[in-house]
Image (spheres, grey):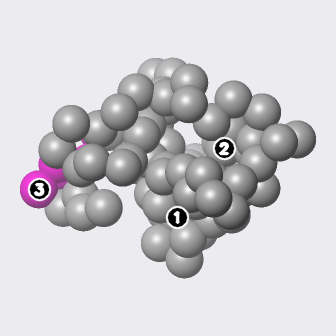
Amino acid sequence: MDYRVTFAAHADRDLEKIVRFLAQKNPAAAERLGYALVDDALSLANMPYRGLAVQARPGYRRILHRPWFLIFYRIEEARRLVEIARVWDARQDPDAFHL
């Protein structure tokens, strides 16, 4: 792995909220989704620039975990670090989203 991947506190809370919500209906699916989202985020260690640039927030990029989840992150090239900033369920109110 070329880059180290870390999760900001807000991203950790996002993941917990997503998994907890789904677990109320389907605990097994919640566990699978949680691991899949973390795996997608960790995969940025090998190809951090594959995500799309976020036009409204210079320095941030995003990848999609189909069908509804966006993983927002930024790259600190000097430190070879990818910081996961948010894990967002795109079905939520867009006005509630802040990077």
Specify the quadrant that holds the C terminus.
Answer: bottom left
Q: Is mark 1 on a helix, strand or loop?
A: helix
Residue placed at 52% from the left, 64% from the top? Answer: 11
Q: What element carries label 2?
A: helix
Image-based side of 57 in relation to 89, left or right: left
Residue 83 in the image: state x and y as whole percent: 58, 59
Q: Can see residue 72?
A: yes
Tag 2 or tag 3, which sits nearer the N-term? 2
Considering only vertical position in the picture, is 1 above or below 5?
Answer: above
Residue placed at 18% from the left, 51% from the top? Answer: 93
Q: How far, Cα to Cα, is label 3 from label 2?
A: 24 Å
| Residue behind mark 2 | 41
Q: Work out which residue is located at the far right of the displayed protein and give it.
A: 1
Q: Which of 28 and 92 is in front in this view?
A: 92
Residue 33 in the image: state x and y as whole percent: 67, 40
Q: Quick check: marks 2 and 1 in contact, CB under 8 Å?
A: yes
Q: Quadrant of residue 68?
A: top left
Which of the labelled discs sits on residue 60, or is there none? none
Residue type (three-letter) at the residue carrying disc 3: Asp
Q: How far, Cα to Cα, is label 2 from label 1?
A: 10 Å
Query: Which residues fall within the magenta stretch?
Result: 91-95
Tag 1 or tag 3, which sits nearer the N-term? 1
Which of the labelled discs sits on residue 95, or is there none? 3
| Residue behind mark 1 | 11
